[in-house]
Image: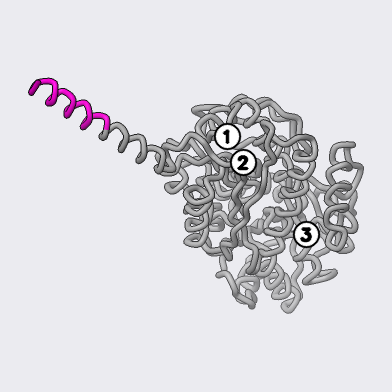
Amino acid sequence: MGRRVRDCGRRAGLGGLLALAAIFSALSPAKAQRAEPCIGASWEVTGPLANQGLMLRIAVETALEKINAAGGVLGRPLRLVVYDDVGEPARAVDNARRIGERDNCVVMFGGARTPNAIALREPLEEMGMPWIGPISAGTTVIEHQNGRNQWMFRVSMKDRWVTGYLVDQAKQRSASGRIAFVYEGTAWGQGALPDVEAAARRAGVTLAGRETFNIGDQDMSAQMIRLRDAGVDTIILWAVDRESANMVRSMDRIGWKPKIVSAWGVTTAFARAIGPLADGIMVAGTFNWNGQLSPEAQAAFDAMKAKYPDRIRSTADLEQPSAMANAWDAVHIIVEALKLAGAYDRTKLRDAMFRVNYTGLVADYRPAFIRDNQERMDAVLAEHYKLQAFHNGMLLPIEATPYGMRN
């Protein structure tokens, strides 16, 4: 009898421990298998880049409306949950925790700023939550220094590839070969500096100057005077709308107008801010809505216009043209991966991402991503990059402007 009591006690104790383990496992976000049918997003809803957050919302919500009208995903509607990070990395981390632990979304959507995305690397790994970025292009967002990125995917540009593209474009357009690099003093700008220098060496270019400025700076005259006096005729620019506009105004004050080949931090909001001064400034991108569109792209634009008639009246109102197309494709890649996963399960979704083949607006993703290859956790390849230019206030394909000629 005593032995049976002891055995029952041991079994009861073991059962209790197993029950506790099951409870803790269920409560742990990193271990959770079931997730909710939602995409969580941390975007700059307010702040200097609020227009980019709005453009992402327009693209993602319109894509989801189309998908849900066709029956949703795995028989359930897929919804969007958005939190404002005001452009601050700490806020982005807080939002990621909320998305992963409280909302239990199956995937997280990234925003515009590279420093925010970099800050999410450890939290995402701890929670075991997939993330997909349509804008933030910093190389180390995806290519982690420890070589162990498992959760962060991107349908966007990669700075290491963009820098090579821009150096080549600048070299083709510079009459004197005097090319300089101007960049914002953030993790995004500073992270691009070694990539630009490496790309310049590969192209046989010696940079004639390197100048930087801080977020919020209004007068860059001193930096521009140094570059002008160094004989620079072409600038590779790494900055966003507000500071880029202030830089161009500073150039105008000193009577200097070099060619500018920019990363895609500048949008149509930049052109609105400085008017004709924007004409001729070239921008790398992945997609342009101003021109002949495929039937799929036309349908996407028509749907965005119908859903947001007060905000989207023509393709010129798509202020982040590349990012909006990237976001549209990213939503559909998530949907394809969920179908392959067969469940709202983060790990299964992550694993299914490597099996997605999808024809999108920006590219034919076959496959979208490659397992055990950090470089190919990026879906958009350098061969898909396109050069655009501002002309009469619009960002157009370079061939549709007077600025397509090379020196």
Q: Check if mark 2's residue and mark 3's residue have beta carbons within 8 Å.
A: no
Answer with mark 1 or mark 2, whichever residue precedes in sequence. 2
Cα distance in 3D space between marks 1 and 2 = 6 Å
The region drawn magenta spans 1-15
Q: What is the quadrant of residue 361 in the picture?
A: top right
Residue at x-position 70% and y-position 48%: 171
Answer with mark 2 or mark 3, whichever residue precedes in sequence. 2
Q: How many residues crowd mark 1 within 10 Å: few (<14), some (14–19), many (20+)? A: many
Residue 309 locus on image (x, y percent): 87, 59
Q: As shown in the figure, which amino acid type bears the numbered disc 1?
A: Tyr
> What SS does tag 2 mark?
strand
Residue at x-position 50% and y-position 60%: 89
Q: Nearer the viewer, residue 338 or 135?
A: 338
Residue at x-position 69% and y-position 40%: 77
Residue 88 locus on image (x, y percent): 53, 63
Q: Is residue 372 above or below residue 54?
A: above
Residue 292 locus on image (x, y percent): 91, 42
Q: Which mark is residue 281?
A: 3
For the question of whether residue 381 can be seen, the reply is no
Mark 2 — residue? 37
Residue at x-position 74% and y-position 63%: 258
Cα distance in 3D space between marks 2 and 3 = 42 Å
Q: Which mark is residue 344?
A: 1
Q: How many residues crowd mark 2 within 10 Å: few (<14), some (14–19), many (20+)? A: many
